[in-house]
Image (cartoon, coloured by chain):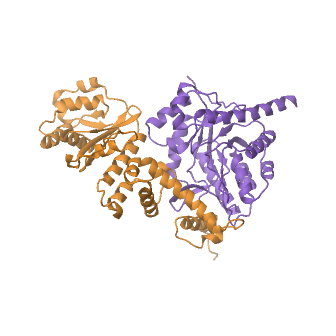
Chain colours: A purple, B orange
């Protein structure tokens, strides 16, 4: 039997997380796709891949990498690439994405999504890296804008221009994390609307929504709570500008009951549906 | 004569030297080795040092979290504070070498065996070894069970030279301590009887897949020795001899059948003993 590939853009997707496996098998929720962290399925076999194969029968899947380190000065790790390709070949995901960040340098890894200094030099380098990944995988990928808690003195390019240039010149698409735009706009004092307006319609393949934590000093992108009101507003604006785009609710820490996650997804569904109606009316 | 243009020179210019410098200093600062990295960072409402501290916290939380996920029994035995202290030292001494956190922490059992604060828990590194092996089995490749009919087709004269292949998700762990009992009483939801008989002697454990779970079981010495020999590539006859040398009760046929049925042995090829 053929596995579904098409993601309905009028309904949101959710992250596939182990605590929900049982509930989702017993009662498959009506979400448009499931997203997994690629590295969690880099093993040779066993339970993780068995479950993923099972869910893949019923849902389109998006593989979302956290460790490829596109923005590192190091060359890409061939072993990491090989495992990613093996997963992509096995699962045939509809969407494949990585973060626009670095996670290690000089062979030493910090395993966190670290910000890139937005310089001409880094831009050229990242464009080359994305090109090599796409050549190796034999398919287009998406790159995601990350949250950050600092800016480098060297940065000479606004983040939104950096993201846009990478997509345009590397021939990849953007995974636009609307929560990260909001978090960074507060942390670095820029206009989130200007960021959104710089993103070309047609260049975005997926949108992420998540919760953050306000520590009083900065907003930290924790993926551990519901999406805040300001981020929903920004999302509405994004959908108006970009059209309905496959949207994912991310929730990775303090993972709630499946129903809570599905409620969040339903909120995104309503915004997506409203935009469809507005389009038909126009 | 003009000097020829050096391609290597051009490549060097195109390599992201500034990016590498920034990232290397930033990474050093997060691991507490460069106090000048603050000058790379814009101040704003927070000082550069404070911003570095936020990242340092995130990085350490991720790496400690990876160790916690793989080594829950060790953490249960030593407690959260001890675990964190040891983890921080381990992380400083043994940096992560992959963007895939599932590959981090293989050296943790060795680290614990020489960690000065753990000298009074000499079994701790064996517990850690068992947990790493559990983690390996969880992600190891799948394999089909061996069809017994294939084995039945082998003429008796060829039995001695059979070379069996173990399932990729099979590991053998020997310990001088009652490791299985230590493991059991430290599982979540285990009952009140947590007494451990420290005089019970050591354990020879088989770790394998059982459906979606990982099973850990104690083997008699002979059976353990037999599987150890097979895993090193020994043919059946020398493996059985090694088993009988430590355990006169070793029942070759019975154990072989059991190992095929539980998919511990999944394949074989013919050869010479």
| Quarter the C terminus of chain B occupies | top left
**Residue A237 or A230: which is nearer the viewer?**
A230
- Residue situated in front as seen by the camera: A276 or B74: B74
The N terminus of chain B - image quarter: bottom right
In the picture, measured across the screen, residue A76 lies left or right of residue A218, that is: left
Q: Name, please, the residue furthest toward the bottom.
A: B1
Is residue B273 in sight in this rendering?
A: no
Q: Residue at x 84, y 28 (%)?
A: A280
**On screen, B220 above or below A222?**
above
Depth check: A44 or B126 in front?
A: B126
| Residue B81 visible | yes
Q: Position of residue B239 (x, y in %)?
A: 19, 40
- The picture places residue A261, in percent across and down from the top left corner, at 62, 36
Q: Position of residue B195 (x, y in %)?
A: 28, 45
Give the residue displayed 21% in from the left and 43% down from the top: B225
Q: How many marks?
A: 0
Residue B205 spot, x, y in % from top left: 27, 42
Residue occupying the far front of the picture: B192
A251 relative position to A50: left or right:
right
Question: Front-most of A140 and A58?
Answer: A58
């Amino acid at each position: 039997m053929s596995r579904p590939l098409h993601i309905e853009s009028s309904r949101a997707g959710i992250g596939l997380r182990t605590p929900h496996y049982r509930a989702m098998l017993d009662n498959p929720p009506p979400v448009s796709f499931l997203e997994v962290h690629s590295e969690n399925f880099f093993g040779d076999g066993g339970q993780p891949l068995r479950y993923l194969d099972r869910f893949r029968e019923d849902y389109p899947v998006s593989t979302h990498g956290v460790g490829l380190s596109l923005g590192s000065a190091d060359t890409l790790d061939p072993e990491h690439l090989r495992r990613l390709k093996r997963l992509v070949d096995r699962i045939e995901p509809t969407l494949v994405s990585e973060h626009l960040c670095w996670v290690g340098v000089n062979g030493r890894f910090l395993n966190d999504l670290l910000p890139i200094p937005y310089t001409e030099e880094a831009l050229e380098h990242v464009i080359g890296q994305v090109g090599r990944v796409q050549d190796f995988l034999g398919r287009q990928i998406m790159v995601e804008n990350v949250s950050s808690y600092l800016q480098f003195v060297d940065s000479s390019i606004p983040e939104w221009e950096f993201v846009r240039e990478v997509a345009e010149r590397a021939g990849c698409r953007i995974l636009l994390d609307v929560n990260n735009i909001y978090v960074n706009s507060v942390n670095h004092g820029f206009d989130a609307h200007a960021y959104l307006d710089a993103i070309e319609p047609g260049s975005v393949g997926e949108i992420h929504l998540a919760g953050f934590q306000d520590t009083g000093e900065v907003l930290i992108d924790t993926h551990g709570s519901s999406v805040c009101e300001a981020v929903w507003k920004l999302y509405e604006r994004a959908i108006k500008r970009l059209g309905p785009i496959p949207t994912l609710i991310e929730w990775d820490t303090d993972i709630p009951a499946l129903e809570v996650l599905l409620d969040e997804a339903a909120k995104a569904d309503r915004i997506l549906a409203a935009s469809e109606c507005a389009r038909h009316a126009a | 004569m003009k000097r020829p243009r050096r391609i290597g020179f051009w490549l060097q210019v195109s390599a992201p030297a500034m990016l590498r410098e920034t990232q290397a200093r930033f990474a050093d600062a997060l691991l507490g080795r460069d106090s000048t990295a603050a000058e790379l960072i814009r101040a704003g409402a927070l000082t550069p040092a404070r911003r570095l501290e936020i990242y340092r916290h995130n990085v350490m939380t991720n790496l400690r979290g990876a160790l916690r996920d793989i080594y829950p029994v060790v953490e249960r035995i030593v407690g959260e504070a001890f675990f964190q202290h040891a983890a921080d030292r381990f992380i400083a001494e043994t940096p992560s070498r992959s963007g895939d956190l599932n590959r981090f922490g293989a050296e943790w059992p060795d680290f614990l065996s020489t960690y000065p604060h753990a000298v009074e828990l000499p079994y701790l590194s064996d517990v850690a070894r068992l947990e790493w092996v559990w983690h390996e089995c969880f992600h190891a490749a799948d394999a089909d069970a061996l069809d017994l009919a294939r084995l039945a087709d082998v003429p008796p004269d060829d039995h001695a030279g059979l070379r069996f292949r173990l399932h990729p998700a099979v590991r053998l762990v020997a310990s001088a301590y009652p490791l299985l009992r230590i493991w059991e009483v430290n599982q979540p939801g285990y009952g009140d009887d947590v007494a451990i008989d420290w005089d019970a002697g050591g354990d020879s454990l088989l770790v394998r897949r059982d459906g979606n779970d990982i099973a850990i079981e104690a083997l008699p010495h002979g059976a353990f020795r037999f599987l150890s020999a097979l895993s090193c590539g020994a043919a059946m006859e020398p493996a059985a001899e090694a088993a009988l040398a430590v355990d006169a009760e070793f029942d070759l046929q019975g154990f072989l059948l059991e190992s095929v049925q539980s998919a511990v042995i999944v394949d074989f090829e013919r050869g010479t003993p």
